[in-house]
Image (spheres, grey):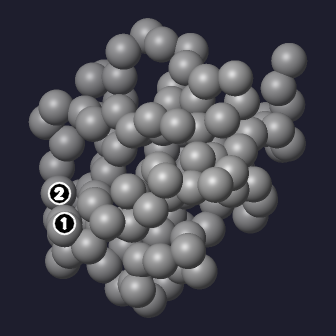
Amino acid sequence: MLSQDKPGLSIDGALLDAINEAAVQTYPNEFVAALRAEKGVINELLMLPGTISGERSGILQLHMLPIDFSVVGSVHSHPGPSARPSEADLALFSHFGSVHIITCLPFDRTSWRVYNLRGERIELKVID
Ligand SMILES: [Zn+2]
């Protein structure tokens, strides 16, 4: 069993780069997706139909999520220099999944942060 505090997960480095690329493409709107993991490695994004883009509204539409235990959390971009979760982000984190990534400008390997369901910083190992 994976604990929610130490998810014991890693992330595929290529996926991390794809997330940052998507954030660049979506800028100045927010990029939002769900994260899927296989054998403890986050390796796929799940794009949700009907996701709203735009500052302050880049919230995952939870009712659109499939019932799928490979979904471990969420990722979204902040079109600014801060990866701090907003109040709305914290509300989302607490309701869904255990790993939540926020990437911010400049959208590279140094600009992403990972949070647990309480909005506390956690680490994810990057596998290249
Ligand atoms: Zn946010």
Q: What amino acid is labelled 2 in the image?
A: Ser
In the foreground, 74 or 23: 23
Q: Give the secondary structure at mark 1.
A: helix
Asked whether disc 2 touches disc 1, contact meaning CB atoms under 8 Å apart, the reply is yes
Find residue 120 and report its horizontal and vertical position in percent. 74, 60
Q: Is residue 1 left or right of residue 78?
A: right
Find residue 69 and report its image quarter: top right
The residue tagged 2 is 53
Q: Residues within 10 Å of mark 2 (few under 14, many from 20)?
A: some
Please report the residue visible at 55 percent of the width from the left and 20 percent of the height from the top: 70
Please report the residue visible at 44 percent of the width from the left and 62 percent of the height from the top: 17
Q: Give the secondary structure at mark 2.
A: loop
In the foreground, 15 or 79: 15
Find residue 118 and report its horizontal and vertical position in percent. 70, 51
Q: Looking at the image, can residue 51 be seen?
A: yes
Q: Is residue 27 left or right of residue 108?
A: left
